[in-house]
Image: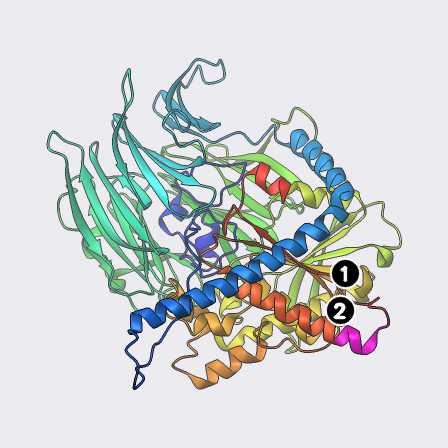
Amino acid sequence: SCVGLRNLLQGLSFSVRYYTKHNHLQTRCLYSKIKPMKCHIPDCSGSMCTPGNILPWRFFSCKQEGTKISSKSKQNTSMTTLQLLYKNLLKSEQENWNGISPRYKAVTERIKKKLEELHNKYTFNSGSPKIRFGENVYFEEGGCIFLSKADDVDEGNVDILFSTEDLGFSDAFIQRIRISPDQRYMAINLKSQNSEKATCIVMKLGHFPVVEEVIPNVFSFEWATNDALYYTTQKNLKCQNVFMTTFTNQKHTKLVYTEQDARFFVDIHCTKDRRFLTINSNSKTTSEVWLVDCRDPLKLPTLVQARAKGVIYHIEHRNDELYILTTYGEPAEYKLMKAPVASSGVENWQLVYALKEKTKLADLEMFRDHCIMFLKNAEHLYLNVISFVSHSVQSIKLPTWACEFELESHPEHTTSTCYFHLTSPVHPPKRFAYSFKENNLIEQAVQEVPIKTNCHTTRLLAKSKDETLVPITVFHNRNSKELHRKPLLVHVYGAYGIDLNMSFKEEKLMLIEEGWILAYCHVRGGGELGLSWHKDGCQHNKLKGLHDLKACIRLLHEQGFSQPKYTALAAASAGGVLAGALCNTDPELIRAMVLQAPFVDVLNTMMKTHLPLTVEEQEEWGNPLADEKCMKYIKSYCPYQNIKTQHYPSVFITAYENDQRIPLTGVLRYVQKLRKAALGHARRTCKKGNCIPNIILDVQATGSHCDSPWEDSLNE
């Protein structure tokens, strides 16, 4: 169930596996047990977004003298009026888009053709992950799950165990699978492209696999024994209940655990040695873990350590000891600690390894005698291999071009090799292996076509308003001359402790080949320099992220990377806060802004506690309802609140009708207000409208707040 520790350690903001063409199935690593919490507006990168109807604003009805109209009737009238207003706004934007989009037909076709060529060229090494159990190998391709013997997997001798199309789920993709220890059962999570809701299908395997059970609205699940499945259910983007179903002669389901605090999100994972299931209840800042003994799964779960404000922890197991990845103690960065299973309280936690200052733990994988930490320090990647036998730590610096790790599945903790991929926005994934026996790193030459990228990587440090040095990663074509005349695409996020997504994208490589410069600004609020980097850019520190972004763009221009009239800014989801704020405060720094499902109305959203994630989001943005200073502070940077009649760059926004995390109503209002302000300024200062910026909204009828499959993302 590995979702790459990436997101959890990036700030506990968002508990979903990213759905990409490289990895449809979630595999198991320690990170899978320590998945991040969902965020109100995650870096979709994610795979758990649910559509749903646009949530209406909160309605109040007053009793008036002399009228007998019921409050319910008034409420319905109010809703009808708002729904009509929303419908008219949406129709207006759709008509605007339909009128504008034909202008871009030629360039769209050219780009699409180029992206398809790059995709076909660089997808040979990105097959689906294979999960090995003894002599059997399970893998997924094209909506089907296959079984093969380990020796036959490359010979094409496979059995089909499951097909989404045959069972009537043709519009769904397989999000994760779990095989029971004796391989008699297989649990599969299916999710459609337009919803965050997932359905769990339990198959009884054998000569003729059959559907044993269909469980709706399941988020995470694990087998405790051969016939006992634990799972969490999801409602309104929240997971707070854990159930157990036994597939014996008398099938039985019971509620095992309920989380009462709305700020906490619950998921389930299995320790690498399959000794325990962990019930993990996490808020953005605090954790609590309960253990289910896989040898006696009917016994009540036992508490590891009661939640303590500000302490995050996650659990693995080895040789009757719990290995605890935690922020407990000073400094408040991640440490690996251990304690006996029988006395797991914090008073018995012993330090195994502590991260260095400003080091980001991107992933972690446990094996029988070793632990591998995947680390980022000063934007360089490292492996730290901890031996539990010799009590030594070996540190290995990885290639300088690498920006992201992608860990492969290792379901058998006794394996002697750890496999992973390294990638960057412009470098397709390369496979590497670390051998515990040989104590060395090996690059796996699996590419049929040599990967050649004529790209240069530069790392800069921008000095922010308070003198803090902010990292920037820059990519450009080695052969480019007069870089100050080249177009520049700046990327920013800066929320939830999540790093900027720097995995390979065909469109990024295409831009490099066409002479663009790409810059990634690792501003505070993200997680690139550890937990303190996030803390220094959330709640009452949000403006620091904006100051960082300004400093980064100015430094890029000073260093000769493009200039304002050739600069565009790109952001998605919560990255829209800083991007939108920059447009209000320093619009002269950029020529254009591109936003995807952007969070641009922070204040109104955080004032609406009926929205599904507002309460748990207070740890990121603050609580304006309870704190007037917080309300004023949010208002000081909120993109929607600070639109004014002035010059604005051109803006292109993609939004989704079924996006429950970023309700479309807020995006529509933002676009209307921004366009009105830009037009007002243009009328006062320009003749014949020759400096009116393009402000375009493309509303997608399908899709949600998640990464799309390749075909859909290509069309976008």
Instruction: Give me the C-alpha separation between circle 1 and circle 2.
Output: 8 Å
Assign a secondary structure to mark 1: strand
Q: Which residues are magenta?
A: 681-687
Q: Is residue 69 visible?
A: yes
Q: Is residue 496 visible?
A: no
Compared with 136, 283 (above or below) is below
Disc 2: CA contacts within 10 A as few (<14), some (14-19) or many (>=20) = many
**Image quarter hosting the N terminus:** top left
Instruction: Give residue 294's position: percent from left, percent from top.
Output: 20, 40
Instruction: Give residue 122's position: percent from left, percent from top.
Output: 65, 32
> What is the chief secondary structure element of the magenta stretch?
helix
- The mark nearer the N terminus, 1 or 2, is 1
**Quadrant of residue 215 within the rendered picture:** top left
Mark 1–mark 2 contact, CB under 8 Å? yes
Q: How many marks?
A: 2
- Residue indicated by mark 2: 589
Name the side, left or right, on which 647 lies relative to 492. right
Instruction: Give residue 447's position: percent from left, percent from top.
Output: 64, 27
Q: Judge whether residue 575 is colored magenta.
A: no
- Residue indicated by mark 1: 567
Q: Judge whether residue 686 is colored magenta.
A: yes
Assign a secondary structure to mark 2: helix
Q: Residue at x 44, y 36 (%)?
A: 173
Q: Nearer the viewer, residue 286 or 540?
A: 540
Q: Residue at x 44, y 13 (%)?
A: 157
Instruction: Give residue 522's position: percent from left, percent from top.
Output: 62, 61
Q: In the rendering, which numbered label is found on residue 468?
A: none
**Quadrant of residue 649 within the rendered picture:** bottom right
Compared with 590, 155 (above or below) is above
Q: Nearer the viewer, residue 354 or 205?
A: 205
Q: Residue at x 64, y 75 (%)?
A: 643
